[in-house]
């Protein structure tokens, strides 16, 4: 398996533009996470999905951020409009939750998307 | 509200000695804990985990200890090697699958 695939690896955009980050989870995984890495908060959980359904989006910083998971093999994180303070590395991760949501499994991360908003 | 805290941003250790990385949490509902390692320009990779029903888990040079009464876990690396230099994140998992990470500790192992 190729692992979790994120695209693009790097994105530079101007303030006010729309940015879309993409993620393909590992095949067979039924849980997907979006994180943002910052110095102050470390790996900050933005949102996560179970079986393509958003479960907790309390970490999404503002209404400018939205995430979708239209099917089991694809998710997007969109920022509209983007601002310089959104500059960070964004990670997608997936894991397989077994029946009854037994939690003894690790999550696998993609390589991340480094976003720079100028 | 930082539910998982790593209060030491950095740690420097001599090669061959023990590295001890610490993590505190506030939510007693966490039932599974994990440590990840991250190199620059790469995604975090899983290192070792422990269930809340245990107090120790060992894998080669890596041992994780859990003290539930103190809401504290630690990662011990013995002996430390220069290749262990990286950022280490602890994480905790809740029922329903929510996975929360700490701020990370940058470990530097000097030859």
Image (spheres, rainbow, N blue to C red):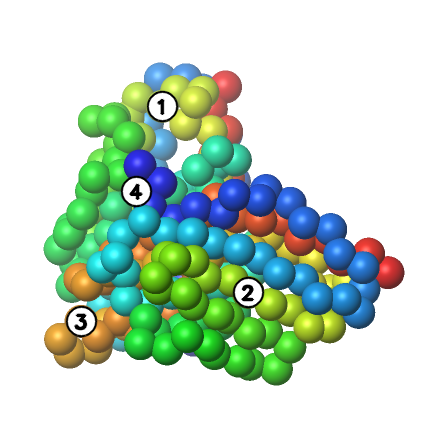
Q: Measure the C-alpha gap from mark 4 to mark 1.
A: 16 Å
Q: Relative to B50, is A56 on the left or the right?
A: left
Q: Are marks 3 and 4 on the same chain?
A: yes
Q: Are marks 3 and 2 on the same chain?
A: no
Q: Which residue was labeled with disc 1? A: A82
Disc 3 sits on a residue from what chain?
A: A
Q: Secondary structure at mark 2?
A: strand
Disc 1 sits on a residue from what chain?
A: A
Quadrant position of residue A3:
bottom left
Q: Are marks 2 and 4 on the same chain?
A: no
Q: Where's residue B31, x and y in %?
A: 28, 66
Q: Compare residues A83 and B87 and report the one nearer the observer.
A: B87
What residue is at 15 percent from the left and 50 percent from the top? A54
- Relative vertical location of residue A83 with respect to residue A87 in this rendering, above or below: above
Q: Nearer the viewer, mark 2 or mark 4?
A: 2
What mark, if any, has residue B75 been given in the picture? 2
Q: Which residue was labeled with disc 4? A: A46
Q: Do callouts 3 and 4 mark residues in contact (Cβ within 8 Å)?
A: no
Q: Where's residue A58, x and y in %?
A: 21, 39
Q: Compare residues A68 and A104 and report the one nearer the observer.
A: A104
N-terminal of the two: label 4 or label 1?
4
What residue is at 59 percent from the left and 42 percent from the top? B9
- Relative vertical location of residue B46 with respect to residue A69 in this rendering, above or below: below
Q: Measure the C-alpha gap from mark 3 to mark 2.
A: 26 Å
Q: Which residue was labeled with disc 3? A: A101
Q: Where's residue B44, x and y in %?
A: 51, 58
- Relative vertical location of residue A46 with respect to residue A64 in this rendering, above or below: below
Q: Where's residue A45, x and y in %?
A: 33, 45
Q: Nearer the viewer, mark 3 or mark 1?
A: 3
Q: Nearer the viewer, mark 2 or mark 1?
A: 2
């Amino acid at each position: 398996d190729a692992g979790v695939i994120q695209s693009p690896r790097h994105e530079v955009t101007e303030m006010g533009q729309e940015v879309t980050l993409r993620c393909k989870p590992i095949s067979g995984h039924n849980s997907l996470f979006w994180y943002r890495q910052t110095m102050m908060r470390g790996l900050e959980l933005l949102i996560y999905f179970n079986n393509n359904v958003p479960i907790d989006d309390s970490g999404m910083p503002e209404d400018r951020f939205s995430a979708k998971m239209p099917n089991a093999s694809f998710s997007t994180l969109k920022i509209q409009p983007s601002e310089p303070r959104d500059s960070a590395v964004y990670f997608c991760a997936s894991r397989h939750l077994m029946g009854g949501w037994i939690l003894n499994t690790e999550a696998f991360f993609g390589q991340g998307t480094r976003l720079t908003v100028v | 509200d930082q539910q998982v805290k790593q209060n030491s941003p950095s740690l420097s250790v001599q090669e061959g000695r023990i590295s001890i990385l610490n993590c505190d949490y506030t939510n007693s509902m966490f039932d599974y804990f994990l440590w990840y390692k991250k190199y620059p320009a790469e995604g975090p990779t899983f290192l070792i985990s422990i269930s809340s029903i245990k107090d120790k888990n060992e894998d080669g040079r890596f041992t994780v200890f859990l003290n539930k009464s103190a809401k504290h876990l630690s990662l011990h690396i013995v002996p430390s090697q220069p290749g262990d230099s990286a950022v280490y994140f602890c994480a905790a998992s809740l029922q329903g699958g929510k996975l929360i990470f700490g701020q990370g500790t940058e470990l530097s192992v000097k030859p």
